[in-house]
Image: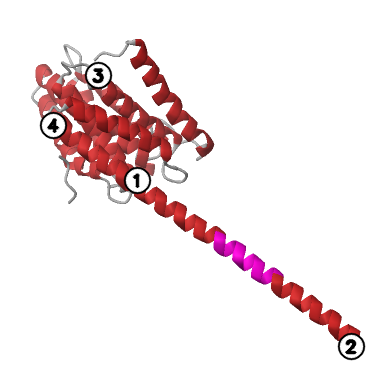
Amino acid sequence: MFSLIKRSSCVITAVLCCTLLSGAIVSNVSAASVQETQADSELMKQLNDTATSLYRKSLENNLVGVREDVQLITTQVGQMSYDGVTSVEGMHALTETIVEVKEASASTDAAADSLQHASAKLRLAVDSLAHPEKPLWLQYYKILKEDIAAVQEGALNHRADSLMVTYGEFEQHYETIRPAAIIKKQPYEIERFDSWMSYLKGLTMRSEPNYEAVGEALQQGDEFVNALFGKEKDETAFTPFASGPEPWAAELFIGSTIMAVLAYVGYRKFQGTETAPFTRR
């Protein structure tokens, strides 16, 4: 009887030890996860601050400052984890904007307009990562709506020259937010909007445009702008220019993709082949 009680006591002790050990392991894992999240949050804040600094320096045409900041951004981007933050397409868009700023600031006589445009794209792209719930690029909704209205006016008045100018402004505004939108939206949504933009460009850049076709395209484009900015929930009424793929993830390759692209830029610069503020409401 005594031996049975002793064996039972040993079993209970073992179970308690395992329970405490499991709890300690879970606690350690949770603590490590919290620390990692906090570290990523701090890195994201630093990245966002650097992108803001770079954009301000580009407005001052401070090439030395822009180069220093873009180099710091290159380092910060390589240190972060993007698992669950954005897609492979989003990270590719971010690295492309970094490359664009490097190229725009490489020459001593860099064009101020090109540098500012590239810096604005990078500023918005980083902000889209840092503030996914309310990114700054959503403030462009009104601007793009006004652009569509301007193109529409040119079509109504049968002004081919006006169509070309107003479409050019519209395209530039969209290109400014495109990397940020790629980070936030599904790939098929960007592909659909890109396809529509290409179609509209073909209509507006003709010497003798089909004004009726331009008007019809703008009506559909107005709905696409609503969808891109999350203003229209019912997307089933649209005729898609590009169908949406099944969601998939390849976070394993994101880090290597970033470093490969940025390393290639460094190689190009070494070989001598490179030529040369937003507010939250």
Residue 1 located within the stretch drawn in magenta: no
The residue beneath circle 1 is: 44
Q: Position of residue 178 (x, y in %)?
A: 29, 33
Q: Is residue 162 above or below residue 149?
A: above
State if disc 4 and disc 3 touch (CB < 8 Å). Answer: no
Q: Amino acid at mark 3?
A: Ala
Tell me the SS state at disc 2.
helix
Tell me the SS state at disc 4.
helix
Upstream in sequence: badge 3 or badge 2: 2
Residue ID at (70%, 72%):
17
Please name whichever residue, 91 or 140, is drawn nearer the observer in this view of the structure: 91
Mark-to-mark CA distance, 3 and 4 = 16 Å
Of badges 3 and 2, the one in the foreground is 2
Q: Quadrant of the N terminus?
A: bottom right
The residue beneath circle 4 is: 59
Is 263 placed left or right of 58 in the picture? right
Question: Mark 4, residues whose alpha carbon is within 10 Å: few (<14), some, or many (≥20)?
Answer: some
Q: Which mark identifies residue 2?
A: 2
State if disc 4 and disc 2 touch (CB < 8 Å). Answer: no
Residue 25 located within the stretch drawn in magenta: yes
Mark-to-mark CA distance, 3 and 2 = 85 Å
Mark-to-mark CA distance, 1 and 3 = 26 Å
Mark-to-mark CA distance, 4 and 1 = 23 Å
Upstream in sequence: badge 4 or badge 1: 1
Q: Position of residue 147 (x, y in %)?
A: 15, 32
The residue beneath circle 3 is: 106
Q: Secondary structure of the magenta portion, mostly?
A: helix
Of badges 3 and 4, the one in the foreground is 3
Q: Amino acid at mark 4?
A: Leu
Tell me the SS state at disc 3.
loop
